[in-house]
Image (cartoon, rainbow, N blue to C red):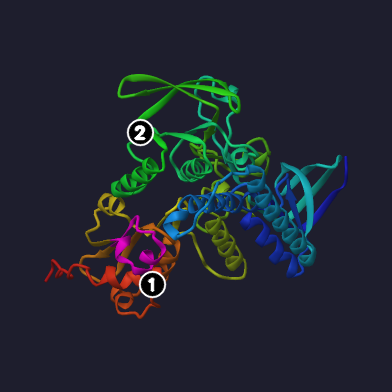
């Protein structure tokens, strides 16, 4: 049995929150160790956010090329080289890994490649990737364990060896017919990208619309986009069974409106949700409790049920976004330095990177109604934004919710080109507590997407008098 080594700070998992807490503590002079099983830097730079956006952008370039005549370009032929698509992505990933390794070196953090398992409070046994074991105790422990794709309990699905986003983002060949289970962020982004590369694509969704958490008009707009691009969409459809093997031949039996149908494809992608990586690592040995769904139980300061142990990011049940994980890191760090920050009432931006993008901040109409919040709404088509005319990107709309009795912005939904940029402008105003009139009267550069806010906000319905009045 190896001797127990002691570190002031021990971080398990090198995702967004974990790596930043490690780097910060290391630079501050604390003896810090980072334990990572495989992905240096976590999922985001390796198999998730950045690689997906890299591949999606390649698909967008293909889309532009196919629209060449619209922009006065004449192509004799167009050939998709998936190996070239992957090379560009892999080069980016390798660059990101090098950047991360440099950060570990300069911060003084010891990066330990292996699998940690708790054997006592704040003590782990690490099975090293290179062989052997180490026992490590940390005065303070930070968990950033991440999540993985869930595989639904459908007969034959697991045996078909379906792709998750990990395998789909590493394809060197183009599927002949890709069947996508799920119409959330991963399913929608990758379905459109693969269709643009030239694959036949079918999306199967149990719910009544695409992007089920959004307003019905958003679901309709996404459906119209996918249908225009030749993607088959099956709504209110459940998968009954799967036969065959993904990458060769797949037979999917589905049910919709009490009618059975059989689909045949070459590949299947599962994008139906995520599960926390909290099982089998001895958290119970450390007094760390889990929720019924398997997430680490934390309070609003991200403290676990075990003293001097924090959990951050996906494994703590935070919204599954890298920007949220980074904010988790900031909350924990500020509180360690005497602050009093919490996760309560955070203004979390959402962005779906289809083309065009879907962005939202604050409430949508569905949420406002569910909460019983009265609101005023104003909406314009993207075609009203002059920048979109110059780009030939007229699809979509901008919709804003404003409080009835005040001019406070309740929420914004944007479906259109560079929606994320418009989103950031309104988010800043909401964080500052500015009334919508400040943006309405602001001078935005012409022609930019943000200039559309002048057009939108000029049409907000008048404020209603207080009921008490």
Asked whether residue 55 appears in the rendered view, the answer is: yes
- Side of 43 relative to 125 (left or right): left
Quadrant occupied by the N terminus: top right
Quarter-of-image position of residue 6: bottom right
Where's residue 315, x and y in %?
57, 46
> What range of the chain is rendered magenta?
381-400
Q: Is residue 317 above or below residue 417?
A: above
In this orientation, does residue 348 appear? no
| 137 left or right of 389 in image | right
Q: Position of residue 13 (x, y in %)?
A: 68, 50
At horizontal 31% and vertical 67% (from top left) the residue drawn is: 409
Q: Badge 2 is on which residue?
A: 235
Up the image or down, 321 lies above or below 429; here it is: above
Q: What residue sits 34% from the left and 40% below the top?
A: 209
Of residues 233 and 187, the one nearer the viewer is: 233
Most distant residue in the left direction: 469
Quadrant of the drawing holding the C terminus:
bottom left
Seen in the picture, residue 41 relative to 183 is either above or below; the reply is below
Q: Nearer the viewer, residue 83 or 428?
A: 83
Q: Which residue is mark 1?
A: 429
The first of marks 1 and 2 along the sequence is 2
Q: Nearer the viewer, residue 284 or 320?
A: 320
CA separation, marks 1 and 2? 37 Å
Residue 448: x and y, percent?
40, 71
| Count of numbered tags | 2
């Amino acid at each position: 049995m190896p001797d127990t080594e002691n570190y002031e700070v021990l971080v398990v998992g090198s995702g967004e929150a974990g790596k930043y807490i490690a780097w910060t503590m290391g630079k501050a002079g604390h003896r810090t160790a980072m334990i990572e099983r495989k992905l240096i830097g976590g999922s985001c730079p390796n198999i998730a956010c950045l690689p997906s956006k890299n591949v999606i952008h390649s698909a967008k370039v293909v889309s532009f090329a196919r629209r060449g005549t619209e922009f006065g370009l004449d192509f004799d032929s167009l050939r998709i080289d998936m190996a070239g698509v992957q090379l560009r992505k892999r080069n980016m990933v390798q660059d990101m890994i090098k950047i991360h390794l440099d950060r570990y070196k300069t911060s003084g953090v010891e990066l330990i490649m292996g699998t940690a398992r708790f054997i006592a409070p704040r003590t782990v046994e690490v099975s090293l990737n290179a062989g052997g074991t180490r026992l490590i105790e940390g005065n303070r422990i930070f968990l950033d364990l991440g999540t993985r794709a869930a595989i639904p309990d459908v007969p034959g699905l697991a045996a078909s060896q379906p792709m998750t986003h990990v395998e789909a983002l590493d394809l060197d060949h183009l599927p002949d017919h890709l069947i996508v289970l799920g119409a959330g962020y991963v399913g929608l982004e990758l379905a459109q990208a693969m269709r643009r590369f030239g694959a036949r694509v079918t999306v199967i969704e149990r719910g009544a619309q695409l992007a089920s958490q959004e307003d019905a008009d958003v679901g309709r707009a996404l459906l119209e986009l996918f249908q225009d691009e030749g993607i088959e969409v099956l709504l209110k459809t459940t998968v009954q069974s799967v036969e065959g093997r993904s990458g060769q031949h797949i037979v999917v039996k589905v049910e919709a409106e009490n009618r059975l149908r059989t689909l045949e494809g070459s590949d299947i992608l599962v994008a139906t949700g995520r599960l926390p990586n909290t099982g089998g690592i001895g958290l119970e040995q450390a007094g760390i409790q889990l929720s019924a769904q398997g997430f680490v139980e934390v309070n609003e300061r991200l403290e676990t049920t075990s003293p001097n142990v924090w959990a951050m990011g996906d494994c703590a049940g935070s919204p599954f976004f890298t920007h949220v994980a980074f904010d988790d890191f900031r909350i924990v760090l500020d509180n360690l330095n005497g602050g009093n920050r919490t996760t309560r009432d955070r203004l979390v931006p959402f962005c779906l990177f289809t083309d065009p993008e879907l962005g939202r901040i604050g409430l949508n109409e569905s949420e406002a109604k569910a909460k019983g919040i009265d609101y005023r709404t104003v909406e314009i088509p993207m075609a009203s934004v002059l920048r979109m005319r110059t780009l030939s990107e007229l699809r979509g709309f901008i919709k804003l919710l404003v409080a009835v009795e005040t001019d406070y912005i309740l929420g914004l939904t944007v479906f259109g080109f560079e929606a994320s940029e418009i989103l950031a402008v309104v988010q800043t105003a909401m964080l500052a507590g500015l009334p919508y009139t400040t943006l309405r009267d602001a001078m935005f550069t012409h022609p930019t997407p943000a200039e559309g806010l002048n057009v939108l906000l000029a049409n907000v319905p008048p404020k209603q008098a207080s009921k008490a009045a």
